[in-house]
Image (spheres, coloured by chain):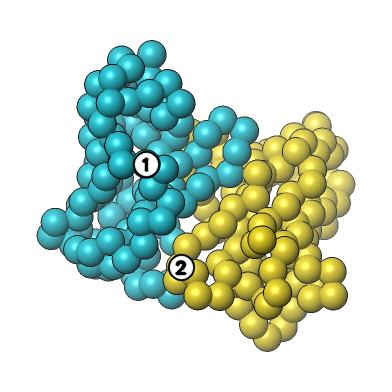
Chain colours: A cyan, B yellow
Amino acid sequence: GAGVSQTPSNKVTEKGKYVELRCDPISGHTALYWYRQSLGQGPEFLIYFQGTGAADDSGLPNDRFFAVRPEGSVSTLKIQRTERGDSAVYLCASSLDSRSPLHFGNGTRLTVT
Amino acid sequence: AQSVTQPDIHITVSEGASLELRCNYSYGATPYLFWYVQSPGQGLQLLLKYFSGDTLVQGIKGFEAEFKRSQSSFNLRKPSVHWSDAAEYFCAVVFTGGGNKLTFGTGTQLKVEL
């Protein structure tokens, strides 16, 4: 069956611009997670949704980062006024519920020039 | 503070040799423990997990891991490495009360020599 889908796979943007990254979870998965992986590092937690609500957004680095999941399925990670330090691979994962294993997408590679 | 450490950044082994990747955590209780593999351009794939019970856990692709409470370790092993095992390996934990929020180590890059 279809896995977690992330679009675009690559995004290049200029410093100061706004970007949106999309995640389509596995159908029926109620939990959705965003992680950020910088070069040479392990993924770092950003935010976790259970259904439509953000159950834990403690990993968002600052108020330029925001994520939504309005219908409890697709999620969008939004980054305002991008900075070069935001360059990373943004990973999305979903799970059947909060206790089931995570299934990761292939990520969106964001480059801020 | 809660943390996960993978002390080896790079490891090179010959095909057919045995492999052990190290993982240590810092935490007052026993967390949930995971190993993931990431191949270039691919998403993270779960190899195995430990929640409780038998401390020797079998996973996919012939991997196993052993939880040692006294050493706060969860090392990944494979008796005979194949060239296709070359990838980056991440140890991850969920600390109690952390929901399903994974904390990852910095990863170990495995190179397999033919």
Q: Is residue A98 left or right of residue A43?
A: left
- Name the residue furthest left: A71
Residue situated in front as seen by the camera: A86 or A40: A86
User: Around disc 2, counting alpha carbons within 10 Å, would you say few (fewer than 14), some (14 to 19), or many (20 or more)?
Assistant: many
Q: Which residue in the protein does label 2 denote?
A: B100
Amino acid at the residue labelled 1: Asn
Give the number of marks. 2
In percent of width and height, residue A67 lies at 26, 48
Q: Are marks 1 and 2 on the same chain?
A: no
**Element class at badge 1:** loop
Q: Is residue B38 left or right of residue B15?
A: left
In percent of width and height, residue A4 lies at 33, 51
User: In the rendered structure, the residue with mark 2 lies on which chain?
Assistant: B
Q: Is residue A18 left or right of residue B74?
A: left
- Residue B73 in sight from this viewpoint: yes
Q: CA distance from mark 1 to mark 2?
A: 22 Å
In percent of width and height, residue B15 lies at 81, 40
Amino acid at the residue labelled 2: Asn
Q: Which quadrant is home to the C terminus of chain A? A: top left
Q: Which residue in the protein does label 1 denote?
A: A62
Residue B56, placed above or below residue A72: below
Q: Is residue B48 left or right of residue A6?
A: right
Q: Residue at x 59, y 49 (%)?
A: B37
- Residue B58 in sight from this viewpoint: no
User: In the rendered structure, the residue with mark 1 lies on which chain?
Assistant: A
Residue situated in front as seen by the camera: B50 or B104: B104
